[in-house]
Amino acid sequence: MSRFPTVAAFEAALASLPGPDQAARDAAAARQMQLTKPAGSLGRLEDIALFMAGWQGRARPRIDHGLALVFAGNHGVTRHGVSAFPAEVTAQMVANFAAGGAAINALAGAAGLDLRIVPIDLDRPTADFTVEPAMSEAQCLAAINAGADAVDPSLDLLLLGEMGIGNTTAAAALCLRSFGGTAQNWVGAGTGVGAHGQMVKRQVLDLAMACHADLPRTPFETLRCVGGREIAAMAGAMLAARHHLIPVVLDGFVCSAALGAMAAGAPDICNHVIAGHRSAEAAHGRLLKRLVLTPLLDLGMRLGEGSGGAVAVAVMRSALAMHDQMATFADAGVSAG
């Protein structure tokens, strides 16, 4: 299943998530035990190889066809001054991506990933979610399916990223609606707003929660009420990837919030996902703990675009090279002890 024509189809896909190939994972684990090293001595590199084996269904996984998929959308909530940058920067950055001048262009290339940018209705921002849902049902489904349609079933690995001025406010709203707490728990500096800007963001979240208090707290309704088109698209891409058995690498807070909106109703959606890094946005670390995801990297990054995830893919390639290219004890004539 890669498209979700109705809300019921989206919910059914979340309720029927396929699992990894345990036989392939077991075969990879058996190979690990024969490689010329003490068991467990390469730490998470070994775990990554087993994770990839299970989801790719092969004992010696590889990344021949990896894609960095970056969605872009605009947010009506920016009218409240929640970002240090104006909304038109979204389209300007999409043009920069197309010209090859952004961080993700360089980092995707360094990680050996193809790069695709998917702007979604940039001339039509979502509604101001402090007074009405960000999207209608049809608009949210269209964004979810834009994400699902962008996933090639032949991929070995999918990295997700985003661009959208104001989307850390939307991400914070998703987390607050999905996991509770207070606005203080989920609001941070985002693109660099100071104390006043963060106070405004907290006020915006409180207004949003009150506005939508009587609506169901299902994953779809949460995405529709306080999400964004690029966030809903990432959710659709993640869900489609799961049904194609494609492992997914997440970038930062906004990507993780798209996952979180689904995980609040279907925790198993996290099982095929690797958190590429922990963003400098403090709420990201809190969210990853709620999702039981341990980030591969913590480099103080907070750019978005898929940038931190791309650096993590380079580490994952090292893990797979180790798993595939190391000699076994028998091959090397080394005693296994």
Image (spheres, rainbow, N blue to C red):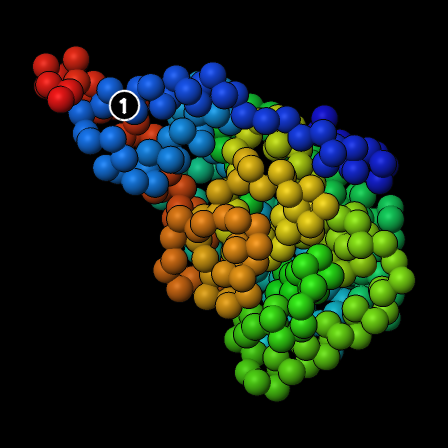
Position of residue 186 measured from the top left corner of the image (x, y, whole percent): 61, 68
Task: List x then y, in percent, for residue 147.
Answer: 68, 41
Q: Determine if residue 104 is in view.
A: no
**Above or below 81: residue 269:** above
Outermost residue on the right side: it is 214
Q: Quadrant of residue 222?
A: bottom right
In the foreground, 223 or 263: 263
Residue 184: percent from left, percent from top = 62, 75
Which residue is rendered at x = 20% and y = 18% of the image? 328
Q: Is residue 294 above or below residue 37?
A: below
Secondary structure type for disc 1: helix
* Front in this rendered view, residue 110 or 252: 252
Q: Amino acid at mark 1?
A: Met
Between 248 and 263, the one lying in front of the other is 263
Residue pictured at 62% horizontal, 65% vertical: 168
The residue that label 1 is drawn on is: 33
Which residue is depicted at the point 68% across and 77% down?
Answer: 202
As displayed, is residue 139 above or below residue 227? above
State the image quarter where residue 110 is shown.
top left
Question: Which part of the image, by quadrant, shows the N terminus?
Answer: top right
